[in-house]
Amino acid sequence: MNKIAATLCAGTLAFSSTAMADNWSNKSDEVGIGANTTLGGTQGLQIRYGATSAATLQATIGLSNSTASVDDGDTISTAQNLGVGVAATYKVIKAKTASGSLVGSVDYHQYKIGSITDDAEGGLQNTDLILGVGFQGEVFLAKKFSIHSKVGLTFDSFNGAEADAFEGYGDDDTDDDNDYSGMAINLSGGLIGGAGFTVWF
């Protein structure tokens, strides 16, 4: 029993000394790939680049595309949601295995709902631009692997999708000259809602 306890203690000390010796959170000039949820709501693949020891640039892209056969295949119903988010983080809390950073982000979303038949293709579409500012906490579970979560404030100057403000495209008969405007200010993110992970190279 004493040998097992001694082995566990030695392993823990070795791991701790390695973690303390290396600054895992310093990702200057390193690239990371993982998954992310932005403050603006884009969910998908994320690429990160450590510009300096404190500043990181990142891009997130998400795509949802679905089709369904309607009327025995005479009509194909389609739905698409594309999201692209870019952000920059700057560390204000630094530790060797964790960090806290300010976040500034911009997200672009495009929504499309339509149908395809033998002689026509069209439907409704909407685009949106969302600005965000917040705080991100990140923990490095290993030198090359980290998890993060964020919370912040978003400003949506259009908010067309939530208000059902769509415009026609293609052969759709809906008036495509709709001018819509709106505004939405939200607190978003959180432990799960703004979570993600990164594998660093």
Image (tube, rainbow, N blue to C red):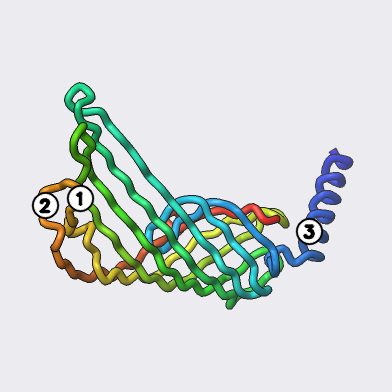
Residue 124 image label: 1
Residue that numbered label 2 is attached to: 174
Q: Is residue 92 shown left or right of residue 103? A: right
Q: Which of marks 2 and 3 is nearer the N terminus?
A: 3
SS at badge 2: loop
**Residue occupying image coordinates x 72% and y 57%:** 143
Q: Which amino acid does label 3 sit on?
A: Ser
**In which quadrant will I find the N terminus?**
top right
Q: Is residue 147 shown left or right of residue 169? A: right
Q: In which quarter of the image is residue 23?
A: bottom right
Q: Gap in Å between the C-alphas at discs 3 and 1?
A: 56 Å
SS at badge 3: helix
Q: Nearer the viewer, residue 164 or 196?
A: 164
Residue that numbered label 3 is attached to: 16
Measured as percent of width and height from the top left, residue 186 is found at: 31, 67
Q: Earlier in the sequence, mark 3 or mark 1?
A: 3
Measured as percent of width and height from the top left, residue 194 is found at: 45, 58
Q: Say whether marks 1 and 2 touch (CB < 8 Å).
A: yes
Q: Is residue 96 visible?
A: yes
* Number of residues whose C-alpha sits closer than 10 Å to that of mark 3, classed few (under 14), some (14–19) or many (20 or more): few
